[in-house]
């Protein structure tokens, strides 16, 4: 059973942080720019992605977050109008002005401000957001290596079968993003890894989670 919505804010003051404005959201990079910047910053820090994620993984373990939260490349797909937010409902994600209580943050900047949301349902029930302490430590690791393109995202509750990952593609609507399970393929063109699960054991991430990004239409 879902926890009553009015109990959600008690989990963490983080939930009360303001949404970012549409203009700030619109200033977020597209995935290909965010991915390139991540690689540049890693090169400056003289770290591979694997090495960098090894620095982050212990924090997720310490908090018991390895199955709840993943690291994501902060990016946008569509431009928002003031008052709109990107909200995921099952597989479809689109801008909306809906401010219903059953819409909760799903992705956060390293500072803890939410920038994308989802509708709570039976598949994605209510769960507490990352703690304020977690965000402080997450940001300090990023700052130590001068990485500024990463954020935190919630991991969907319905587990991916082995050999599958999630692929974001353009939906039917003009500003609609679809996220589907697809079999792992190493030769997907025009795609980018966009989030990573931190593995148990203190090592890296295992695979890219909502990764392979199929937003060619919006990303060109
Ligand atoms: Zn994306």
Image (tube, rainbow, N blue to C red):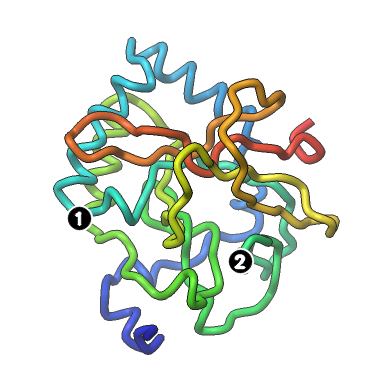
Residue receiving disc 1: 133
Q: Is the CB of the residue bearing disc 1 within 8 angstroms of ligand 1?
A: no
Q: Residues within 10 Å of mark 1 (few under 14, many from 20)?
A: few
Number of numbered discs overlaid on the protein picture? 2
Residue receiving disc 2: 90
In depth, the one of 209 and 51 nearer the eye is: 209
Question: Which quadrant would residue 48 be assigned to in this image?
Answer: top left
Mark 1 and mark 2: Cα distance apart in space: 30 Å
Residue 41 in the image, given as x and y percentages of width and height? 43, 20
Residue 159 in the image, given as x and y percentages of width and height? 43, 55
Quarter of the rendered image showing ligand 1: top right
Q: Is residue 149 left or right of residue 140?
A: right
Residue 100 in the image, given as x and y percentages of width and height? 57, 83
In depth, the one of 174 and 125 nearer the eye is: 125
Q: Is residue 146 visible?
A: yes
- Which residue: 42% across, 38% down? 196
Of mark 1 and mark 2, the one earlier in the sequence is: 2
Q: Quadrant of the C terminus?
A: top right
Q: Which mark is residue 9?
A: none
Question: Which quadrant would residue 98 be assigned to in this image?
Answer: bottom right
Q: Quadrant of the N terminus?
A: bottom left
Residue 158 in the image, given as x and y percentages of width and height? 46, 60
Question: Which quadrant would residue 133 be assigned to in this image?
Answer: bottom left
Q: Which residue occupies the extreme front position in the image?
A: 162
- Which residue: 37% across, 89% down? 4
Q: Are marks 1 and 2 in contact (CB under 8 Å)?
A: no
């Amino acid at each position: 059973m879902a926890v009553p919505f009015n109990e959600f804010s008690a989990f963490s003051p983080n939930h009360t942080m303001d949404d970012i404005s549409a203009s700030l959201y619109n200033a977020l990079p597209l995935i290909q720019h965010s991915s390139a910047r991540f690689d540049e910053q890693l090169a400056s820090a003289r770290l591979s992605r694997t090495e960098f994620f090894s620095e982050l993984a212990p924090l997720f373990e310490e908090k018991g977050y390895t199955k709840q939260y993943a690291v994501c490349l902060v990016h946008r797909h569509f431009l928002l109008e003031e008052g709109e937010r990107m909200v995921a409902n099952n597989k479809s994600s689109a801008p909306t002005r809906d401010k219903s209580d059953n819409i909760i943050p799903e992705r956060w900047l390293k500072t803890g401000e939410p920038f994308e949301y989802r509708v709570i349902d039976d598949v994605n029930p209510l769960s507490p957001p990352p703690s304020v302490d977690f965000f402080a430590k997450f940001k300090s690791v990023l700052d130590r290596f001068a990485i500024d393109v990463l954020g935190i995202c919630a991991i969907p509750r319905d587990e991916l079968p082995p050999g599958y990952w999630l692929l974001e593609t353009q939906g039917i609507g003009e500003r609609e993003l679809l996220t589907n399970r697809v079999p792992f393929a190493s030769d997907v063109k025009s795609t980018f890894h966009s989030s990573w699960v931190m593995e148990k054991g203190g090592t890296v991430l295992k695979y890219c989670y909502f990764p392979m990004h199929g937003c060619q239409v919006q990303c060109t």
